[in-house]
Image (spheres, helix red, strand yellow):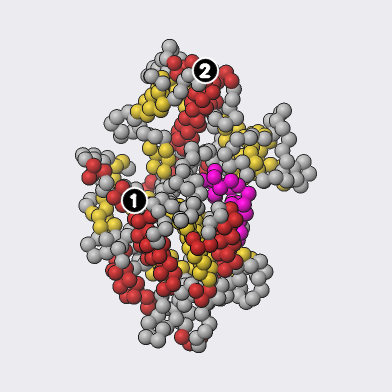
Amino acid sequence: MPSEIRLFALLIGINTYDVSLDASTRLSGFKKLNGAVRDAESFALYLQNRFRVPQDQITLLTNEAATRSQIIDALVKLQNDDRIEKDDAIFLFYAGHGTELPSPKIFKCEEGSKIQAIVPYDCDFVDEKGVVVPPIPDYILGIYLSKIVEKKGNNVTAIFDCCHSASATRGASSGDDSTVSISRSVVLQSSEVYSQQLFQELSELQPVTRGNVFVPKYLNRGLGTHILLAACKATEEAHETNGRGRFSAALLQLLDRVSSGTLQYCDILNQIDKIEGQNPQCEGLNLHRVLFDRKVLPVQRKSFDIVYDGNADGGRGQITVRAGEIHNINLDSEFAVYLKSDISFTNQIGTLLVQELGDFKFTARRPNGAPELNFNQLLVAVQNKIGTEKERIRIYSPPHDGFRKLYEDLVQKQDFTHHPLNNFTLLKSSTSTQRPEVEISLIENKFKFIMSTPPMQEKQPIITHAVDVDNSDLADDELAWIFARMAHFYQELKYKNDFNDDVRKNILRGVDVEFYRLQDDADTDILAPTGSNLCTDGVVNLHLANKADEEEPYGFKITNASSSKLYVNAFLFNTHNLSIGE
């Protein structure tokens, strides 16, 4: 009889790398880790205790059981396991060393570009046939994940507690002292040896792209295949201390203190405790899913950590919130305070106002009459008022429309705790000088939203949303939730950097944005640009005549020749459903 628990896991932890052979048979020296096996075992216990996952649904590979062939065999078994049904949760965890390799020439990347890889137990050994055992690069892992997704659905979570940057090994300690901080990365002296070997492996598998793709025909490629959680940025070090990976320990602490039924992937980075020197990453197309579930919760507002220094300001104490101008915060902004464990923001415990604003943080004060805060608890701030009148979102509804009465009644209740209605101005009339950004009407129990026409868009997007107007409490909640989503959408859409003119001109002159249709490379099936640059004067106009056109993939190429160090954050603002994709 099949188990009722629909979760299957492959957990890998490697502390020691094969020492059974003479050291001369390994081309690189690997330092021993102390916490990778324990991290993998801890996740196994978490799955068994929290989700009651049967032991036979968890594959645990540690040390000598985690050779390259055994890891790949385990991935293939997930693909072919008849017990795993479509859309069952699949969890992949790896703790051990990571590394970097030169990007294969067939990927047509820039000179000197690197790809990431994990290091199996027998990596870099010369076997009896004289063949060097290679690491497992990200694109090979991606192929196996894609094959799993094609059969089992994309409810796949992959967590990697390792790092890849070559600089991560500099000054790193080794030895058996578990109190020593050790970086989980190695430099492979023989990385060039693998090129032909990995090319042969790639050619024998169904190739996949390494880029961001969103169209249905390519949806199980790249970030469409799974949710990826990584211990740090590509340029940072992932460390272990006291016999535990810092990222694994912090993540398990978060999972222990919150309800797994409400935690979305997109919340993890906001809710996890800060890790010194590491900025964990979370990527994928389905970040609003609940952990290990296909269920998607409503989009939550951003939260920011609150830090209190009782010795600052002459002993009077100082409240600092880790948000600043870069997050579109203003001096008039107001924040609701919640316990960090209250990830649904259901119980506001205080209010903060901006006192002194910086680029990445601001000092805050409690308004008169606001409740005292207990700073011994982990607290977060959520913006519920975006600032000055000029930044409010202008909405309009005809004078006798049913929507106007619903909205005015809701405002009278002054229930702004969960939904920022005070970020909107309801216009009395629609004129050329006071043009609304959104026109709203209530027709046959459906809200109809007509969005103002964005630049270069030929038609005004129209959104409809059904609501039960006979149930006033439900109607209020539905309306308030819509406005919370709308406030977040427009706040991010209207954000502008406060660069001075010289900096702005330098960036505009030095950054080149190109946009191309992509096609499969004939030799490798890797997506590559084809045709001319479709970006003209900073604008891309696509005319999609049919369904086939809609399923064609496209990609950006961004070149920075300015004197500023820039990092790309790309967002897709969808005016048809008010979603923001990354």
Whole-percent x, y for residue 486 in the image:
46, 31
- Relative to 519, is 339 above or below? above
Does 107 sit left or right of 288 as displayed? left
Q: Residue 325 in magenta?
A: no
Within the image, what quadrant is residue 419 found in? top right
Whole-percent x, y for residue 35 in the image:
60, 68
- Relative to 288, is 181 above or below? below
Q: Which residue is mark 1?
A: 219
What type is the residue that disc 2 sits on?
A: Glu
Residue at the far front in the pictured view:
1
- Number of the front mark, 1 or 2: 1
- Relative to 474, is 136 above or below? below
Residue depicted at 47% across the width and 82% down the height: 26
Closer to the camera, 90 or 146?
Answer: 90
Estimate how packed mark 2 is, as few (under 14), some (14 to 19) or many (20 or more) residues with alpha carbons within 10 Å. Answer: few
Residue depicted at 43% across the width and 52% down the height: 88
Residue at the far top in the pictured view:
400
Q: Secondary structure at mark 2?
A: helix
Q: Which residue is mark 2?
A: 408
Residue depicted at 50% across the width and 30% down the height: 481
Residue at the far right in the pictured view:
315
Whole-percent x, y for residue 111 in the image:
35, 66
- Relative to 548, is 232 above or below? below
Within the image, what quadrant is residue 375 found in? top right
What type is the residue that disc 1 sits on?
A: Leu
Q: Is residue 461 visible?
A: yes
Q: Is residue 513 visible?
A: no
Closer to the chain start, of discs 1 and 2, is 1
Which portion, as a residue range, is magenta? 245-272
Whole-percent x, y for residue 265 in the image:
50, 48
Distance Cα–Cα, label 1 vs label 2 = 43 Å
Does 508 sit left or right of 545 as displayed? right
